[in-house]
């Protein structure tokens, strides 16, 4: 029972279910690079790499932000703050997941191995960036945006232009919804001197910046679809993304109580739907 409770605590620490944001875009890139099915081995390696990278990023963030999380009513009960997980255990968890991610890169191909180190640095930098710059939201976006870069590198050993467009689209998508999520902590961030966009620019400007980011998301996803030579189903997927992001922006602008639903539900389903349209697009050829 104690072991199961500890597993539950670590799952809460890294919010494992949020892997749904980045994982679909790894596989979108892999399906596109392979022009269809890319094999069981890469499926398994891709899932392990995705989960270990996200575990590393989230655990590092929780470790680095313990002081700030303790003063935030929304985060004060996290296992990294209330003592359920010790500093030593968190550091070990961070090291193990970083090692797994690098090992996955090594067994896939040389490019993935070489990319694994700068990717880990970028993943860790988000936690520190918000102490100095409101660009932290873009760093978080880049952290998830690197997922399709890693996916295409795993399949083809190169980084084509379409994967860069997909990466930038994911970057602005994540940064856009992270701005909305950060509205919940605007007062706390001001008090602690953290450079979130809401604490620096205020609510209305944050909403507009988020809208601009999501408009850029759709532009770069359109460039991805065109450059990769994808078909009708992916364009339909883009229309679905337009609707989903519009609904998200509308819900949050009307009432901040909708932020959790907009953040988790809409964005979670959007990634899965986009992957689904990608798979159907190749199956229909």
Image (cartoon, rainbow, N blue to C red):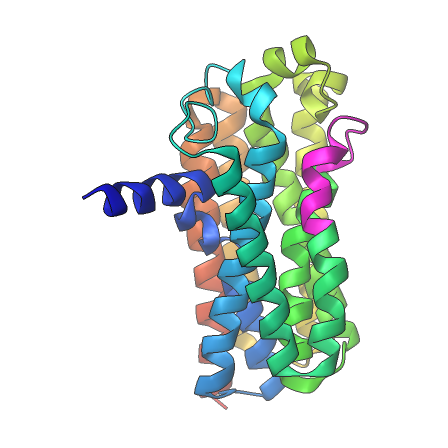
The quarter of the displayed image where residue 97 is located: bottom right
Q: Which residue is painted at 44% across and 78% down in the image?
A: 280
Magenta-colored stretch includes residue 2: no
Residue 20 locus on image (x, y percent): 45, 55
Residue closest to the eye, 63 or 34 = 63
**Magenta span main SS:** helix
Q: Which residue is painted at 47% across and 31% down in the image?
A: 80
Q: Which residue is painted at 70% across and 61% down in the image?
A: 167
**Location of residue 278 with respect to 5 vertically, above or below:** below
**Location of residue 194 with respect to 28 vertically, above or below:** above
The quarter of the displayed image where residue 221 is located: bottom right
Quarter of the rendering occupied by the N terminus: top left
Residue 45 locus on image (x, y percent): 51, 76
Magenta residue span: 122-136
Residue 232 shows up from this direction: yes
Residue 230 shows up from this direction: no
Residue closest to the eye, 175 or 60 = 60
Q: Residue furthest bottom?
A: 285
Residue closest to the eye, 70 or 284 = 70
Residue 32 locus on image (x, y percent): 60, 80
Q: Residue furthest front?
A: 88
């Amino acid at each position: 029972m104690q072991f199961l409770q500890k597993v539950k605590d670590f799952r809460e620490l890294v919010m494992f279910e949020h892997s749904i944001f980045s994982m679909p875009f790894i596989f979108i890139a892999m399906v596109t690079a392979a022009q269809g099915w890319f094999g069981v081995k890469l499926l398994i390696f891709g899932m392990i790499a995705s989960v270990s990278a996200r575990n590393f990023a989230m655990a590092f963030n929780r470790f680095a932000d313990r002081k700030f999380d303790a003063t935030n009513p929304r985060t004060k009960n996290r296992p990294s703050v209330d003592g359920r997980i010790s500093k030593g255990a968190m550091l070990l968890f961070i090291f193990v997941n970083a090692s797994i991610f690098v090992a996955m890169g090594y067994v896939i191909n040389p490019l993935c191995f070489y990319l694994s180190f700068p990717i880990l640095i970028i993943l860790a930098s988000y936690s520190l960036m918000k102490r100095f710059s409101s660009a932290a939201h873009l760093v978080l976006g880049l952290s998830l945006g690197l997922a399709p870069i890693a996916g295409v590198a795993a399949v083809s050993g190169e980084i084509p232009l379409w994967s860069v467009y997909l990466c930038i689209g994911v970057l602005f998508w994540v940064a856009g919804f992270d701005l909305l999520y950060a509205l919940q902590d605007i007062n706390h961030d001001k008090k602690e001197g953290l450079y979130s966009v809401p604490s620096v620019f205020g609510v209305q400007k944050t909403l507009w910046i988020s809208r601009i980011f999501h408009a850029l998301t759709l532009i770069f996803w359109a460039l991805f679809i065109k450059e990769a030579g994808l078909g009708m189903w992916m364009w339909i997927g883009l229309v679905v993304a337009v609707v989903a992001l519009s609904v998200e922006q509308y819900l949050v602008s009307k009432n901040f109580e909708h932020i959790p639903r907009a953040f988790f539900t809409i964005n979670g389903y959007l990634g899965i739907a986009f992957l689904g349209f990608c798979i159907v697009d190749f199956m229909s050829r």
